[in-house]
Image (cartoon, rainbow, N blue to C red):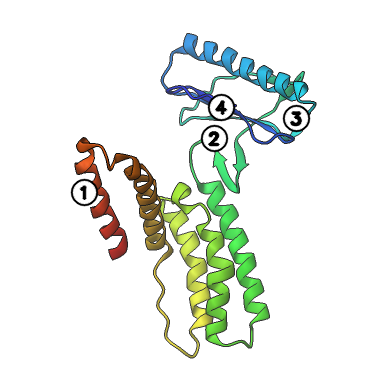
Amino acid sequence: MCEKMPGAEATGNESAGGAATQIKVNEGPGKDNLLTLVVRQQTDLNRINDWAIANKMKINSLKSKAVSFTKKGNKIVASYTLGGETIPEVNKCKYLGITFSSDLGWGEHVTDTAGKAWRALHIVMRVLRKGSDKAKEIAYESLVRPVMEYGAACWDPYRLEHIKTLEKIQKRALKCCRKNSPLKWDTLKDRRTRIRLCALFKTYRDDSRALKHVPEADEKLKQLEHLEQLALML
């Protein structure tokens, strides 16, 4: 179950036997509206619990977390329950392998991603210590770089410190792989830009199938063609 309202909240059940996820955003509405939304969120959680009981399933409340996403210093304090147990509020949560922080920043995720990439790179360097440059390059492109680009269309960092943290890993891999042959790789920042453009193009391309028979959509289709040419040039 998932409900979204402008500047409000979204609630949902992550999986049938897993955790219910509660998300609330403290932006826009006044205090009275926020209190109303808190009541609605709790009502949705009760409906999720009733649905699970009706289907003879049990949601593990220990895996359920409540996160308040806001840039403001003062958050709305609200207590939510699921199946009679209180859902703990945390400052970050991981969903589909991506860490979301309550301050809407990507520092935590970049740190986690860099740690995984360093560990993978050290394994590659140790196993292929006497391997050829080509073998090391293939290993990096197959085992290390995908770790740093997983879901990049969603979390592409904009802070210089986060960009440098990831680029440092590729520079170390490049130094390891080009001992006997010159290599030049695109920066991870440029690759993430292409990933975002491709994701945007794929989204619009799917919409364009339904617009082919709409006369007013000619201008939008022209924009899609331009976007495709831009993605191929990068």
The residue identified by callout 4 is: 2
Q: From the viewer's side, name the closer residue of 214 and 125.
A: 214
Marks 2 and 1, how far apart in space? 39 Å
Which callout, 2 or 1, points to the residue nearer the camera?
1
Say which label, 1 or 3, has the lower sequence index: 3
Residue 223 shown left or right of residue 136 in the figure: left
Q: Pointer 1: residues within 10 angstroms few (<14), some, or many (20+)?
A: few
Which callout, 2 or 4, points to the residue nearer the camera?
4
**Type of amino acid under label 1:** Lys
Which callout, 1 or 4, points to the residue nearer the camera?
1
Residue shown at the point (52%, 74%) measured from the top left: 173
Marks 1 and 4, how far apart in space? 35 Å
> Where 213 falls versus 230 (above or below)?
above
Residue shown at the point (44%, 57%) measured from the top left: 163
In the picture, the quarter occupied by the C terminus is bottom left
The residue identified by callout 2 is: 102
Q: From the viewer's side, name the closer residue of 65 and 172.
A: 65
Q: Give the secondary structure at mark 4.
A: loop
Q: Which mark is residue 59?
A: 3
Marks 2 and 4, how far apart in space? 19 Å
The residue identified by callout 1 is: 222
- For the residues bearing labels 1 and 3, Cβ distance under 8 angstroms: no
Q: Pointer 3: residues within 10 angstroms few (<14), some, or many (20+)?
A: many
- For the residues bearing labels 2 and 1, Cβ distance under 8 angstroms: no
